[in-house]
Amino acid sequence: MPFSTYLDGCRQDCRALVSELGKSFDYVSILGTDVRSAVYRADRKTSMACEGEGECGFVVKMHKGRSFYEYSCDDIRGDKKALAEKIINAVKISGELTDRQIKAEKVEDEPMKKDFVRETDFDDFTDEYLLGVCKKISEELCAKDEKVLNGFGMIMPYRVSKLFITKNRELSQHYGWANGYAMALYNDGKMVQARHVEGSDRLSEIIEKTKASLDGVIDLAKHLVTAQPIKPGVYDIITDPSITGLIAHEAFGHGVEMDQFVKDRALAKNCVGQYVASPITNMHDGAAATLSVASYFFDDDGVLAHDTQIIKDGILVAGLSDLASATQLGTEPTGNGRRDNYRRKAYSRMTNTFFCPGKDKLEDMIASVKHGYMIFETNNGMEDPKNWQIQCTAEYGIEIVDGKLTDNYVSPVVMSGYVPDLLKSISMISDSFKIEGSGFCGKGYKEWVRVSDGGPHLKARCKLG
Amino acid sequence: MSKVIEILNKTNGLYGYRVIENSVSSYELFFVHKNLETVRSTDSKATYVTVYTEHDGRIGDSAFQVYQSMSDDDIKEKTEQAIARANLVSNEPYELTDKGTLDAALPTNLDKYAPEELGRLIADAVYAADTEPGGSINALEIFIYKDIKHVVNNRGVDKTETKYRVMIEAIPTFTDGKQSVELYEDYRFTIFEPEKLTAEIADKMKEVSERSKAQKPGKELNINVLLRPHEIRSLAAELAHDQNYSSIYMHANLHKQGDNLQEGDCDKLNVTMKAIVAGSERSAYFDDDGAQLYDTEVIKDGIVCGSFGSNRFGQYLKVQRPSGDLKCISVGAGTLTDEDIKAEPYLECVSMSGLQLDLYNDYIGGEIRLAYYFDGEKTTPITGITMSAKLSDVLSTLRLSKETDVSGAYEGPVKALLKNVSVL
């Protein structure tokens, strides 16, 4: 499937509306989005093949030295003069707020015209085939062990077309991503869920790897039924890449989203140039930093994707910004302006966030732990960038005693503490690297965007409860 | 919607259809400190179509979205694709929701204001609480929505619900010299009461000033923990959702009807899923199937007694009158008084990162950003702590306050006491 024919047909409408609104504003941009997704899912009793959540519409952004204005709508075709009047009327403010508008520098509008495409293999697979794969995953999971109450297989591809137009700029992008899931609901005196998640821009890869994961899912379920609560305490931990990513994302990533700098909501604002992590630590974020779920070509402000090094040898060197925050801070935007959908505001958001690999071998890291836990699989996390407290919940952990992994599983595992304490405690970093491309991230409790995170295994010290 | 329905009515091979049209208009203000950074307005309509087919004695369904940009031919093509997909899907048969018309609006006073004026009044009400020395509101986001939900199916359902609602995200902050702390708060309402809003923000301003004084306790505690409505709602909702029809049908529910969740001497839980809680933005007259909603008691005197959920899964479980998809929750009052609370040392959770609940692993816990620690004599603010306990243990010793209140989609006790919780 090529770039959206609908958006392609709206290019002239966008230019005309930019021109019309340009009579009232110094800067006008229009982002058009056409996002289509599908869900294929099967379990022992039900099945599903349908469209997933998508979007198709426009957001117009305007600026003239004071506040930013935005208007979101489904269609921009038709009389541009009437639409411009409607937009201006819709964003008018109470007269009593006029004096309270911010003052912001002129928004740069560097000329550029480019069309970006990253092909997928999604069209190689029919609905029937993909639903059949899900059914087979479900059936095989259920057949592997009589204690499996239900087995679930799911495949969710989505495709993005976006068009960005200003007076001087015309960009389009088209790409896709897909996730595959296998999950077993297992009861052996205790009920547990065990799952495997895959992410890729190649459905063929997802199908192959998800199918190959089923023995591992059942094996994990068998261990999880034996899991006990962890005795709360401070322990040496070894993280799997999923938990490494969770730490990168929750512990530090949110704190360097620079719209929080503007609001004085991030402690990190005062720590640029200072040690915030152990000197062996390096961390990046960027849509161009790696290929994963958040690898777009330009952000929702029309800024090209970046690879931003956030932590260099333990020192905080840079943050992540959208257009509005960069304009207010007088910095260059970093391509991190992202919207939940065209109806929502753009904020500074993470994309693909990860710690860089180190030099240690995982087996040496485990061997170095007298008593602690290796922690696996992200459940959820919550940021607190102002106070640098974190809460990261892992699905399970495995006890390490005298440098060896035991068969003692604990679940769930809630990591918490003070961010710099955690990051400065990182003492070993493995030479391996994996990105988990299946996550969603909210800002506070809303504004969900797709993100990835990951990295190597870390050895650190942390409070577990 | 009429264009879509006309096409569906002319389409062969359908067992049925359902169309949901959500029209949303919004006016949004974003403040940085006290300055207006962004003004937004939205005007959008999302139309979701589900087609149903009957094959081999089974039912298939498939859904798609219709966009404003679509032509009649586009919609026809989408419909044919959805029918083909529905024919691949094989589910146990069920009947679509039958008949029913309604055109109703949820009670509100938000419709009395022009959006730009309401936005200013809300901002004024929030900033009126910004009077604490050292305190400030570092960010404020105001979302004013008008939602119109219209559900139509081929079985005679044609229902419309109009809802006005406001969501506010405010960040109370306290700065003392170089140290600065904040709390995150969101408020959702359908009736604007400026004095009440100012009072709620003022309470948070006081709490955030307490956070600036809060210290990490010097020792591990094993103590009674008090939860507030936000967390009590999370606890009750987790227990209730275990009894959703779909969870039961998928064998994912931990507890069965008749299970006693509270064996010990405690205030017994009474949990009811409800259609409407006064002032809640989650209140509704009908669900996505257009089904009438029926309040349903899920836990009575600590014993699982009912289940709730959508028409389809209700039919699968042979429920005579499915409740519909209920979003609000009511918890019965307990016996706990302020005197009871102060009889022993306790820790009152003011702000948590999020209550972590895991029914399967019998776990309750989470990171506490601010708590009041009462040691039997005096109360001090503490921070940087994490609580954890066995869920079954705290349920069996649970105490619930006599005093109740309404908070968002929750009505019930204002305090819940969990005994002997480990706090590190």
Image (cartoon, coloured by chain):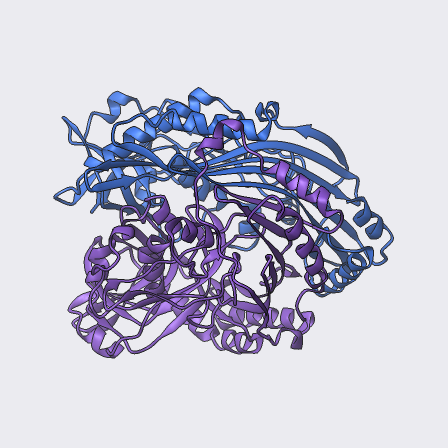
Left or right position of A377 against A37: left
Q: Residue at x 35, y 33 (%)?
A: B228
* Depicted B418 relative to depicted A333: above or below: above
Residue B122 relative to residue A368: left or right = right
- Residue A323 visible at all: yes
According to the rendering, which colour does chain A have? Answer: purple
Q: Position of residue A19 (x, y in %)?
A: 65, 52
Name the residue at the left extreme.
B218
Q: Place residue A318 in its image quadrant.
A: bottom left
Figure chain in blue: B
- Horizontal side of A109 relative to B221 (left or right) equals right
Q: Residue at x 34, y 26 (%)?
A: B202
Note whether A144 is above or below A228 in the view shown: below
Does residue A426 sit above or below B268 in this rendering? Answer: below
Q: Residue at x 71, y 39 (%)?
A: B150
Pinpoint residue B204: horizontal percent, then vertical percent. Answer: 33, 31
- Res B183 → quadrant: top left
Closer-to-camera residue (A202/B19)? A202
* Residue A464 in view (yes/no): no
Numbered circles on residues, count: 0
